[in-house]
Amino acid sequence: MYYWLFMLLAIITEVIGTLVMKCSAEWVPMLGLGIMYVMLVVSYGSLAIAVKRIPLAVAYGAWESLGLVLISLFSALLFSEPLNALKISGIVAIITGMLLLEIGTNQTTHKS
């Protein structure tokens, strides 16, 4: 459970860093970039701790997949970027792929 908390922190800070990157042009650019760099360092550091116990394929898959899903949703909310049926289908496909990766990893682990 402890390592999944680091996984969650990695995902959240990656999402914040990426969203701040988008905003940094409208804010004081150096402040935005500074926040982005700090968030990405925390994200990678947390991911490095998480992969000590979480299989790398699952951790990296979750980090990228859930990060992408959250960034897509928050971009629609915060920046009024369109979220059409095709994008929603992509999000569903990403989540399905992540779940299949997790199930496949668990089956391999239990057989060993």
Image (cartoon, helix red, strand yellow):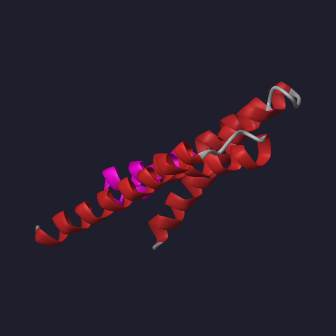
Residue at left offset 45%, top offset 73%? 1
Q: Position of residue 60 (x, y in %)?
A: 40, 48
- From the viewer's side, name the closer residue of 106 and 50: 106
Answer with the quarter of the image where residue 106 lies: bottom left
Q: Main secondary structure of the magenta part?
A: helix
x, y percent for residue 80: 77, 41
Residue 22 image-quadrant placement: top right
Q: Position of residue 109 (x, y in %)?
A: 19, 66
- Residue in front for this viewpoint, 53 or 102: 102
Boundaries of the magenta span: 43-62
Magenta span contains residue 19: no
Q: Residue, x 65% and y 50% (percent of image)?
A: 73
Q: Residue furthest front?
A: 85
Residue 38 visible in this rendered orientation of the protein: no
Which quarter of the image is occupied by the C terminus?
bottom left
* Picture residue at 62% right of the left edge, 45% below the top: 84
Residue 16 is left or right of residue 25, and the answer is left
Q: Nearer the viewer, residue 104 or 60?
A: 104
Q: Is residue 41 left or right of residue 61?
A: right
Residue 77 location in percent, x, y?
Answer: 75, 49
Residue at 86%, 29% (x, y): give it.
Answer: 26
Can residue 19 be spotted in the picture? yes
